[in-house]
Amino acid sequence: MMISISHDKVTTCILLLAVMACLVRSEAPQAVEICSLCHCLKDPKEPSITVDCWEGSRVHRQRFLQRFDLRNILWPVASEVSGSQPPRVRAFFRNLHLPDLPIISASPQVIELSFKSVSLETLPTEPFRNVRNLEILTITGNNLQTIEHDFFAIENNLLRLDLSNNSLVSLSALEQSRFEKLEFIDLSRNKLGTVSRQLLYVLQNASRVRLENCDIYSWDCPANTRWKVLDLSWNHLTDITTKTFNDLEQLEELYLSHNDIRIVYPQAFENLQQLVRLDLSHNDIFNLAYSLIVPSTVEMINFANNSAERWPFHKLSENLRVIDIQYNELSEINPDQTVNVVRLNASHNQIRKFSSESFPALIELDLSDNLLEAIPGGLGQQLTMLTLDGNPINRIFIDNPMVLKVLSLNRMPNVVELEASAFKELVGADESKELDCVEIRIAGCLNLRHIDPKAFEGTTVCKLDLSNNQLTTIPEELIDWKSLYGGVNLQGNPLDCSCSQQWLVDELLSLLYEKRDLQYLLDNLRCATPPERKGQRLVKHLGHRGAFCGAVKMERLRNSPGEDNVVQAGFGSIFCTQYDEDCLHAHEGTGLIIFISMVVITSILSLVMLVFILVRRRNERRNMSKEGALLMPQYRF
């Protein structure tokens, strides 16, 4: 039996099928090339592409939000770079709105993904299962609170994992992860409270572990970890016992700053025989019952911002190079041994005595803001930078040979003057210049009012800072000003801009102004006296020779009755005092010559004018006589 179907019905069916097919195609997601939505940068040296997706212009942003879907993107392929080798792709997504991260489309070329500040709150199960060659993953600066349990349970090649700056309260999802190749993990600035032994076991193959600012109160580390760097700063640890870090035998750097540590067992770090850096700063460590034993491998110790009243360390090894013990309560530094430290910062203590013999290898020494009353002597020949700011030193005088690049003597309240030959034994050590020279800083000494013209005699100075003192005059012969390649800072002093300081305008200002990198030294270089120049910037007078003492000062007569020592200038309404250095005085040598010259010139001009008037009058009379004769009537006899 045959079934007949009309032509119209067949046409209608075909049209319906076509419409349905179009609808299906319109609803199906379309794959979009990532480089059509984001910025792609090709590396000319190797087959790699960097994809940068960020919130750009309005047009770009609208197109991005309408079409962007990590599930349906096409990653760059080999044809987009030179050669046939597939490109390695590094993709960075930042400042976007991606609260829910989907499962990312497959690509064996993606080796790095970064999601920074994209408002991410949750992660789905196995979001990165299609990017099996991923080596670096960064999810930072988001609102991530939880992670699914199979986050990285699959085998992976991850080398670096950064989950910092989120709101994670638990890392149980990571306890089932497989991180055989992981080298670096950053979990800092989360709200963990504690870290389980299981997670630490999972991370045992890592080299660098960052857990700072995670509200951690206790610590228990398993054995056989391979960590080399551990950062536990900004947490709430209180006690460091012999078991706390005993199993971290390969640890090279340990950072414990900004905790609540009060007790440290003497042998707490003795078993860390690979330790190079130890940071215990910003805690509340008082006086240890016994001196701290430091491994012989340690090169740097930071013990700053604690409450130690005595030297806290047991015998130190010859490998130690840097000690920072500032902001404690030490009254002296005497380690009872010779230490090969090259940089020692012991500022902001209560040190009255410094044993320089114990530190013969020092290169930089900072003893600022202590209670020293004299410049320490016997410092080693290696020393190049000495800082003694804020000490109650009464007299600045170096009587022992000293070779320095920088000498800082700022904020010394008891210093009132710099005497002659104060720096005679100081030799410069700035090898970068043709002549060895030294930078000297003596600023903020609120009672320093006088400098002897020979204070720096015998010393080659590269840069001089005398700012914010009480200096009113600067001796012109104080130093070879042209040799100061770093300039001189005289700002903030109550300078007397009178005739004796005219050299500042004529010589020093031009030296500073000619070098663009030294012009900042003119910003606050101002006059304090005389009253009519108070507050004026010296640079205002640049190029005006004799600005302070070469021009006549004329003032209107005010309250002239009773004025003492007034020399009349020739007019009743104008005068100047004989003690005014800016005034032209007839009783002084140069003023007398100028005054006589003015009188002679005035006399000559007056005589010429008088002759001119007389001649003119005579000519006028002669003309009048002739005109009168012509006008007389003619009489006939």
Image (cartoon, grey):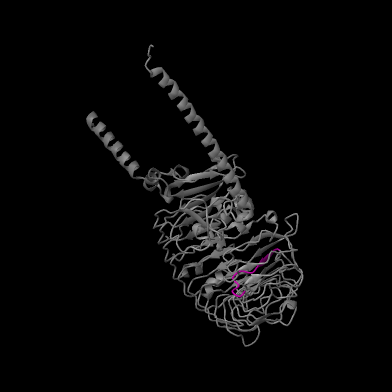
Q: Position of residue 328 (x, y in %)?
A: 59, 79
Q: Residue at x 47, y 56 (%)?
A: 115
- Quarter of the picture containing the C terminus is top left
Does residue 98 appear left or right of residue 308 in this picture?
left
Determine if residue 250 is in view.
Answer: no
Q: Position of residue 202 (x, y in %)?
A: 55, 69
Q: Quadrant of residue 157?
A: bottom right
Part of the protein shown in magenta: 405-414
| Nearest to the observer: residue 454 or residue 588 | 588
| Nearest to the observer: residue 47 or residue 319 | 319
Q: Which residue of the protein is positioned furthest toward the top in this rendering?
A: 636
The answer to whether residue 432 is magenta is no
Q: Which residue of the protein is positioned furthest toward the front in this rendering?
A: 637
Does residue 96 appear left or right of residue 587 in this picture?
left
Q: Position of residue 570 (x, y in %)?
A: 51, 51
Q: Residue at x 70, y 76 (%)?
A: 376
Does residue 130 appear left or right of residue 487 in this picture?
left
Name above or below for residue 349 compared with residue 603.
below
